[in-house]
Image: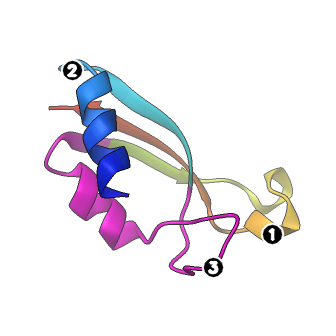
Amino acid sequence: WPRWAARSAELVRSAGVLAGLFYIDDNLRGPPFGIGISLLHTLLDPHFVLEQSLPLQAQESPALFKGKEHWMVWRRR
């Protein structure tokens, strides 16, 4: 995860956005491999500001992902 966060910060220009579905789950087993929300903030907050976080509605997610998928928009500092 730290390498992913650092690379994301390298690839997104200043004021650009990192947007997509994030699988929020503290379970270390996978796949799918999730990430805890506190760890996600620890990794991205130095480089990004979270502008939007919307959980997907239950009917939009497969059973395995219900309640764990979040649409997030992070703006590069």
Q: Which mark is residue 35?
A: none
Q: Residue visible at 80% across and 56% down?
A: 61
Measure the C-alpha gap from mark 2 to mark 3.
34 Å
| Left or right: 39 in relation to 60 | left
Amino acid type at mark 3: Arg
| Left or right: 65 in relation to 34 | right
Q: Earlier in the sequence, mark 2 or mark 3?
A: 2
Residue denoted by label 1: 64
Q: Residues within 10 Å of mark 3 (few under 14, many from 20)?
A: few
Q: Residue visible at 17% across and 41% down?
A: 47
Above/below status of 1 relative to 30: above
Above/below status of 57 relative to 31: above
| Callout 3–callout 1 Cβ contact below 8 Å | no
Amino acid type at mark 2: Ala
Measure the C-alpha gap from mark 3 to mark 1.
13 Å
Please state the horizontal and vertical placement of residue 26, each as a whole percent of the image: 50, 79
Asked if the stretch drawn in magenta spans residue 45, the answer is yes
Q: Write down the region rendered in magenta.
A: 23-50
Q: Residue visible at 30% across and 23% down?
A: 12
| Secondary element at image label 2 | loop
Q: Residue visible at 25% across and 34% down?
A: 9
Measure the C-alpha gap from mark 1 to mark 2.
34 Å
Please state the horizontal and vertical placement of residue 71, each as a whole percent of the image: 55, 45
Please state the horizontal and vertical placement of residue 37, each as a whole percent of the image: 40, 68
Q: Nearer the viewer, residue 25 or 53?
A: 25
| Secondary element at image label 1 | helix
Q: Which mark is residue 29?
A: 3
| Secondary element at image label 3 | loop
